Amino acid sequence: MIQIKRVYESYEPSDGTRILIDRLWPRGVSKEKANLDLWMKDVAPSVSLRKWFNHEESKFKEFKKAYESELSQDREKQECLEKIIALSHQKKVTLVYGAKHPFINHAVVLLNFIQTHFQTDR
């Protein structure tokens, strides 16, 4: 099973393997509080796409399409996806992100991409 969770939410043992999927470290969060197992910067949107999107809701549809294209074509992102899937076969995986909006962010796109393109428990 794979789920998403804001890094600012409390760690729970039921989170399983916690993977930070942001390119930048989240503000105001210590490594201890984040309680991460991995940090996969390479699965995050490219710097140019992240800066262009700027978490603006009006750009989300176009951002989603562009990020999905990156996930489909970028070899480093594909390697990260394969690792996430492999880990999810061992135990629950929580993809951790720092964005404020719970539905307008790259973690939502990433989770949907994984569920659509890979055989995973939802």
Image (cartoon, rainbow, N blue to C red):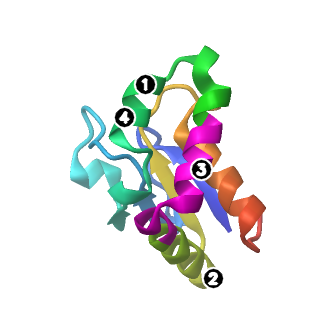
Q: Residues within 10 Å of mark 4 (few under 14, many from 20)?
A: few
Q: Residue at x 46, y 32 (%)?
A: 99
Say if 78 sits above or below 66 in the image: below
The residue identified by callout 2 is 89
State the mark number for residue 52: 1
Sequence order check, earlier mark of 2 and 3 = 3
State the mark number for residue 80: none
The residue identified by callout 4 is 48
Q: Are marks 3 and 4 in contact (CB under 8 Å)?
A: no
- Secondary structure beneath dot 2 equals helix
* Picture quadrant where residue 52 is located: top left
Amino acid carrying label 3: it is Ser
Sequence order check, earlier mark of 1 and 2 = 1
Q: Residues within 10 Å of mark 2 (few under 14, many from 20)?
A: few
What x and y, as percent, mark residue 71?
A: 55, 56
What x and y, as percent, mark residue 100?
A: 48, 26
How many numbered circles are shown?
4
Q: Indicate whether residue 76 is drawn in magenta.
A: yes
Q: Which residues are magenta?
A: 64-78
* Picture quadrant where residue 93 is located: bottom right
Q: Residue at x 59, y 75 (%)?
A: 85
Q: Residues within 10 Å of mark 1 (few under 14, many from 20)?
A: few
Mark 4 and mark 1: Cα distance apart in space? 6 Å
Mark 3 and mark 1: Cα distance apart in space? 15 Å
Q: Residue at x 59, y 21 (%)?
A: 59
The residue identified by callout 3 is 69
Mark 1 and mark 2: Cα distance apart in space? 34 Å
Amino acid carrying label 1: it is Trp
Identify the main secondary structure in magenta: helix
Q: Are marks 4 and 1 in contact (CB under 8 Å)?
A: yes
